[in-house]
Image (cartoon, rainbow, N blue to C red):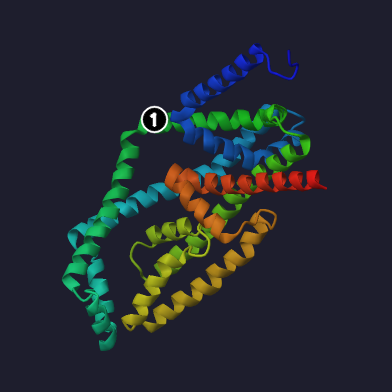
Amino acid sequence: MNQNQPSVHTQFFHILLFVVTVALGWVLLPFFGAIFWGAILALLFHPMQRWLTVRFGKRRNLAALTTLAAAILIVIIPVSVVAVTLVQEVALVYTRIKSGDLNFGLYFQHMFHALPVSAQQMLGRYGLDDIPGIQRKLMEGASQISQFAAAQALSIGQNTFQFVVSFGVMLYLVFFLLRDGGEIGRRIRRAIPLDPAPKQHLIAKFTTVVRATVKGNIAVAAVQGFLGGLIFWILGINGSLLWGVLMAFLSLLPAVGAAIVWVPAAVYFFMTGEIWRGVVLVLFCVVVIGLVDNVLRPILVGKDTKMPDWVVLISTLGGMALFGINGFVIGPLVAALFMASWDIFTQDEEGKSM
């Protein structure tokens, strides 16, 4: 009998291991978001936990509680305040659109009539001179977007109990991951069936990418969104908080980013004769917001996690299409682990051929 052939007991155990792992994932699936963000917060605040554990004389429970309180003050409370204010802003915008006080079609009409006659004629060849039709489509699109945002906010309100339970699960999980994170990490490392070198490389890449994506990119996006909303408010643009949050969200995407929001606003100012407002908006967004991206991102994200912008863009969009808001972390993480795994495989194959 071949000694290298797995025994029936070993095969059965591997099947059992696979089945119970899938079953546990299925059981925990309703709380995927809570578990995911609980693990992310624990990973981000783990250095603080280690530092406090030493300062508190190895009292891990006290250190974990203090770290959890810091996470609530630094992350959860500000995000909750912004979310509540954003829901109110969306409701206000929807009301103004419905009443006709906010008319995107009228803005397009002003821009169209500000164009030279030759440009208007060129647009007419493509059927883009039908101002009433375009106005109606713009109003319908804006109304649908506002209705969708309002429906999402209403859905959260109707599922308050589920939201509260998930939030409690997240905080509960963060505490124990902070307290026992070191031991959990060691068990995971022992369970991964890889050689020590590639195992360590993949774990380091995982940790670095998660911290860079969440800590660095979200911090940069928050600063850019705040600055963008601030300049919109100074220039008297309606819904400055809504546009600021949208700019923060789009700042997570490389190459395009917040420019999707502020460039059309600047174009509108220039085409309607409000030159000084357009100049102020362009200078502020290019110089100040661009400086934040060029200076703050390398400091917080670092150079070790750099991936090509097109990889980050595609993986982020794909991740968000599959996993929603969680995808902006999952997408780049999968892409980074993919590249790291193939680097290890290539190095192993090159080592064998020598």
* Residue at the image position 42 percent from the left and 71 percent from the top: 263
* Residue at the image position 50 percent from the left and 55 percent from the top: 314
Mark 1 belongs to which amino acid?
Answer: Gln
Q: Is residue 196 visible in this depiction of the protein?
A: yes
Above or below, comparing residue 11 to residue 241 in the picture:
above
Task: Name the outermost residue toward the left.
Answer: 132
Above or below, comparing residue 103 to residue 330 in the picture:
below
Image quadrant where one finds the N terminus: top right
Task: Name the outermost residue toward the bottom.
Answer: 117
The x and y percentages for residue 77 are 49, 44
Q: How many marks?
A: 1
Above or below, comparing residue 122 to residue 206 in the picture:
below
The x and y percentages for residue 56 are 74, 33
Label 1: few (<14), some (14–19) or many (≥20) C-alpha neighbours in 10 Å: some
Dividing the picture into quadrants, the one containing residue 12 is top right
Q: Is residue 69 visible in this depiction of the protein?
A: no
The x and y percentages for residue 108 are 26, 73
Task: Name the outermost residue toward the right.
Answer: 354
Q: Nearer the viewer, residue 271 or 169?
A: 271
Dividing the picture into quadrants, the one containing residue 59 is top right
* Residue at the image position 42 percent from the left and 31 percent from the top: 164
Q: Nearer the viewer, residue 44 or 346?
A: 346
The x and y percentages for residue 310 are 54, 60
Identify the element where label 1 is drawn.
Answer: helix
Q: Nearer the viewer, residue 94 or 64?
A: 94
**What residue did someone put label 1 on?**
162
In the image, 225: left or right of 55? left
In the image, 92: left or right of 166? left
